[in-house]
Image (tube, rainbow, N blue to C red):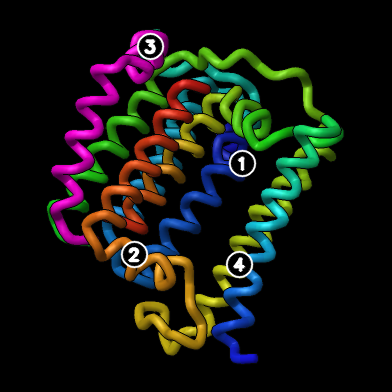
Amino acid sequence: MRRLLTILRDPVAWVLVVAGIVELETEQAVARGAILFAGSALILADRIRSGRGKAGVLRSPTLELDSGPLQEAVTSTRWFALTAVGILLVAVFDRQSQQMTVAASVVGILALGWAWLTVAGVKAPEAIPPRRLLIWGGAFLALGLWELMALLGQPSFSETSYDSPTLSYLFGPVLDTYPGRAVGLGLWVGAGRGLIRRA
Amino acid sequence: MSRHDQILIGYALIALAGVALEVFARRTGNIPTIDATIRWALRTHSGRIALFAVWAWLGLHFLG
């Protein structure tokens, strides 16, 4: 029982669970909720396997694969060329179409799986006092709360509103165009590449 | 000023604050840059998984 409580005590896992529930409740978006639940499940699976409960402790991943090959691959010219072609092709599909959902899900699941199965190759930065990290935490929290306020101001969670625009509502018209989707996909894939290179 | 405008101004102020924080971090070194913060979060396995899950969710939320 004590071990179970220790395993369940990871706040990051529960934040993902709550976000997943909110996603399912507000938009019935199964894929979006599922990716958050998957992240939570992987964190809890690590805890069960390692049997250690202290949050933030570096734990070895399941297979301990080397993260280096993919980190090198994403800097190659071939990767850039293939990714650019892929983005231009996928951007043909409408936002929130089945094809776009499948494409984004496959990329997201592969990246999440890679993050779980590989050894963290990150060179730990010099120790940062938690107090100094709070300022960025505060900035992201402010953005999250502002978005939540806009969301709560809508007629319903699934009905957007001009009077209370969320970020999705504001970016929607841009992402509904082909160039907007191509740029949006490019930014998203670029951010993922940045995570892979730093991970 | 309409509620629509107020919310837009709020988003703009938060974005400006983020840019100001990054500039301040790079110039003074008193606070970590966003890059250092992400690297800090990536140093643990649960941090890696959480960041990749949130990134995947962002793509699905805005595009998928």
Three-letter code, disc 4 = Tyr
Residue with the mark numbered 2: A174
Residue with the mark numbered 4: B11
SS for tag 2?
helix
Q: Is A5 positioned to the left or the right of A20 in the image?
A: right
**Residues at badges 2 and 4 in contact (C-beta under 8 Å)?**
no
Q: Is A198 above or below relative to A15?
A: above
Packing grade of label 2 (10 A; few <14, some 14-19, many >=20) is some
Three-letter code, disc 1 = Arg
Real-space CA distance between mark 3 and mark 4, rounded to the nearest whole angstrom: 36 Å
Dot 2 and dot 1 within a common chain? yes
Count the marks: how many?
Answer: 4
Which mark is nearer the camera, 1 or 4? 4
In the picture, the disc for residue A72 is 3
Packing grade of label 1 (10 A; few <14, some 14-19, many >=20) is some
Examine the image and state in which quarter residue A180 appears: bottom left
> Residue B28 location in percent, x, y?
85, 33
In the picture, the disc for residue A171 is none
Q: Which residue is rendered at x = 34% and y = 68% of the image? A: A172
Query: Label 2 is found on which chain of the structure?
Result: A
